[in-house]
Image: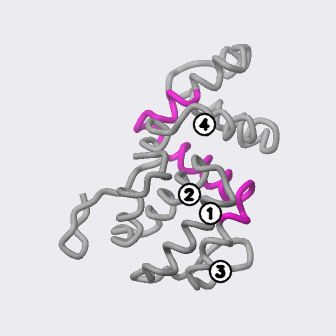
């Protein structure tokens, strides 16, 4: 738990995101990783298998539905946090660059043109944040937006009270 402005909240870790995400979002995520980032997907499968002392060939021979279910279950396990972080970052930066750019530009945060930020603000303007979140939910799937908002909240040790309020109360956020 982190104390910030007399409000207690905890940033949701990547493995918790996998615990609480809906199957459709995770399956779309894994299908994209498998089709578009095959090397990253295979490396993740190998590393996840190593955590459970399983050979990659055993996992690769599973039917896709079983493979995805096993990966989701394993990514939802705390020891897989580093792998889960990496996969979510790759997915967000490569598949959802437009979402990242839209969000940080709406907030007025300087970036490299691809959504990568060097300096994050200490506070977020509530009005700009609300507009940015509304635009994301209009343009992108709710599951992907929810993952991104939680991952953005994790970019600082304390997160932002303004964003936490949205994560806790906005009915469109699918991960709680």
Tell me which numbered mark, 1 or 2, is placed earlier along the sequence: 1
Mark 3 residue element: loop
Residue ID for mark 3: 111
Q: In the rendered view, would you say 20 is above or below 170? A: above
Mark 2 residue element: helix
Q: In the rendered view, would you say 19 is above or below 100? A: above
Residue 132, x across and y down, in percent: 57, 72
Q: Determine whether, in the image, residue 11 is placed left or right of residue 1.
A: right
Q: Are marks 3 and 1 in contact (CB under 8 Å)?
A: no
Tell me which numbered mark, 4 or 1, is placed earlier along the sequence: 4
Q: Which corner quadrant holds the N terminus?
A: bottom left
Q: Residues within 10 Å of mark 1 (few under 14, many from 20)?
A: many
Tell me which numbered mark, 2 or 3, is placed earlier along the sequence: 3
Residue situated in front as seen by the camera: 142 or 121: 142
Identified at 78% across, 44% down, the residue is 37
- Range of magenta residues: 71-99
Q: Are marks 1 and 2 in contact (CB under 8 Å)?
A: yes
Residue ID for mark 4: 26
Identified at 54% across, 44% down, the residue is 84
Residue ID for mark 2: 148
Identified at 37% across, 64% down, the residue is 164
Residue ID for mark 1: 136
Identified at 43% across, 79% down, the residue is 126
Q: CA distance from mark 4 to mark 1?
A: 19 Å
Q: CA distance from mark 1 to mark 2?
A: 10 Å
């Amino acid at each position: 738990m982190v104390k910030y402005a007399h409000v207690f909240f905890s940033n949701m870790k990547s493995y918790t995101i996998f615990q609480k995400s809906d199957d459709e979002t995770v399956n779309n995520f894994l299908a994209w990783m498998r089709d578009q980032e095959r090397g990253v997907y295979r490396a993740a499968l190998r590393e996840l298998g190593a955590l459970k002392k399983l050979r990659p060939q055993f996992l690769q021979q599973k039917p896709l539905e079983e493979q995805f279910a096993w990966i989701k279950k394993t990514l939802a396990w705390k020891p897989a946090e580093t792998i889960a972080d990496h996969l979510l970052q790759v997915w967000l930066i490569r598949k959802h660059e437009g979402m990242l750019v839209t969000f940080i530009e709406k907030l007025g945060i300087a970036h490299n043109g691809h959504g990568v930020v060097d300096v994050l603000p200490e506070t977020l303007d509530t009005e700009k944040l609300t507009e940015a979140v509304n635009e994301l939910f209009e343009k992108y799937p709710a599951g992907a937006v929810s993952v991104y908002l939680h991952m953005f909240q994790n970019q600082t040790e304390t997160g932002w009270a303004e964003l936490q309020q949205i994560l806790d109360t906005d009915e469109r956020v699918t991960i709680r």
